[in-house]
Amino acid sequence: MRKLPRDEQGSELSPPRVQPDYDKRRLKSKEIALVTQVRHYELITPLFGGGVVPGEADPVTLIRGPAIRGQLRFWWRVCRGGQSNGDLWAMKAREDELWGAASTEKKPCPSQVQIRLEITGRGQTEQPFVTRTRPSPNWRDLAYAAFPLQDKTPPGKVVVGPQFMLTLTFPQKHQAEVEAALWAWETFGGVGARTRRGFGALKLVSVNGKPVTPPRTAKVESEIRRGLRQHVVDGEWPAGVPHLSRKPEMKVTKRQGNPDAAWKYLITRLKKFRQARHPGTLPKQPGRSKWPEPDAIRRLMGQRSTKHPNDVLNINKFPRAAFGLPVVFHFKDKDDPQDTILQRKDYDRLASPLILRPLACADGAVGLALILEGTGLTELPGELVLKVAEKTVTAVLDKAEAGEIEPLGGDPDVLSAFLKTL
């Protein structure tokens, strides 16, 4: 990998600033009035990946400008895609006009938003897992969110505490569109991978050199709802496009002392909900799952271990698919079915509609849980397939079935039931 050049003292040299290439004649005629914002950020949770190697931070380009542009495109779509009144191609045309697209000689399509990124603090690396199965002491409550790092040899690392400066220049006529994307990204998103489980969460430190004071914990929810009213359009999104409404399903948790504590609270609650089990027969031994999927797989594949001769639940459905796909089911007993994967029939992945992240406040921190609309299992057409067995299955429950599944408390909407536990 090519290294950055250094000066005579051995310090890394930064690349020269790139000025936006706007037509000078149009600028003189005042056809384009430009806005420039310099926004300083710090990450309040570790950076997961973000480099050229999946799952690893890049040693040279820790945070990449194109990745930030991609995040802003996504959050613009989430907030402003409803302006297209359900027309996918009309939304795509608006998006390309603002954020750019592949250009041809006959149809140039440069971005109207120029982005320059400067790393102001590289942070420190941490290794969440000592071995593949044992988390380090600081990561015991977060290991459930960091599980992809277990599959690496040696276990993967994250970067804690990086900071960066983002300089954006764009036409003033697009200011409302750009600021909507920035607000949503700063409030709900992050940088790197696994941002929907809280990694790479942002804190806005200053804008144009002026410090930004976050709200107090008691006012966080009202501030978020004010932002939703200001930045989210009241329109119709194309089918299958994730988006926000002005009144989304969300939950702001109780005050915690710092962002790390708020994040740990969210992840431990998620683990307790998704991995709910009956008491084991021995101390410290987990019992059988309170969810229907394990017994459903045993029935569908016609195979079960002698340790589990009876069903806990007789429901052939897979409700935890609501948290995202694919889902890998692993059985520990040799007589039980082999590992199998639950995915959609037409494509294997479905990003989780559930966003979990901490928010830094003036008097501590809170946890935020939010459900994106448009990509839930009941909103997207298509079937689910249990691989290996090649069985078509479903995740949608009725009221009676939800009443039998203890973690749901009778609510057939799995994500809404989870929010109630926070």
Image: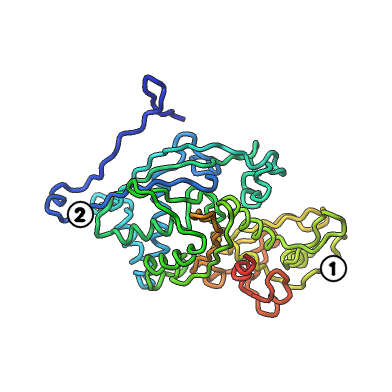
> Which residue is most to the top?
8
Q: Are marks 1 and 2 in contact (CB under 8 Å)?
A: no
Task: Name the element at disc 2.
Answer: loop
- Amino acid type for the residue under numbered disc 2: Ala
* Residue in view at x 73 percent, y 71 percent: 406
Distance from Cα at disc 1 to Cα at disc 2: 71 Å
Mark 1 vs mark 2: give the one in front.
Answer: 2
**Residue ID for mark 2:** 33
> Which residue is most to the front?
363
Identify the mark at residue 310; answer none if there is no mark: 1
Is 399 in front, or is 264? Answer: 264
Residue 77 position, x and y percent, is 40, 62
Q: Quadrant of the C terminus?
A: bottom right
Exactly how many numbered labels are in the figure? 2
Identify the mark at residue 264; answer none if there is no mark: none
Is 311 in front, or is 420? Answer: 420
Q: Earlier in the sequence, mark 1 or mark 2?
A: 2
Task: Name the element at disc 1.
Answer: loop
Is 154 in front, or is 186? Answer: 186
* Residue in view at x 33 percent, y 54 percent: 99
- Amino acid type for the residue under numbered disc 1: Asn
Residue 94 position, x and y percent, is 32, 62
> Which residue is most to the bottom?
400
**Quarter where residue 89 is shown:** bottom left
Residue 279 position, x and y percent, is 82, 62
Residue 93 position, x and y percent, is 32, 62
* Residue in view at x 51 percent, y 66 percent: 375
Tell me if mark 1 has few (under 14), some (14-19) or many (20+) residues whose alpha carbon lies within 10 angstroms of its own: few
Q: Is residue 213 left or right of residue 346?
A: left
Q: Is residue 18 left or right of residue 67?
A: left
In this rendering, the answer to whether 315 lies above or below 62 is: below
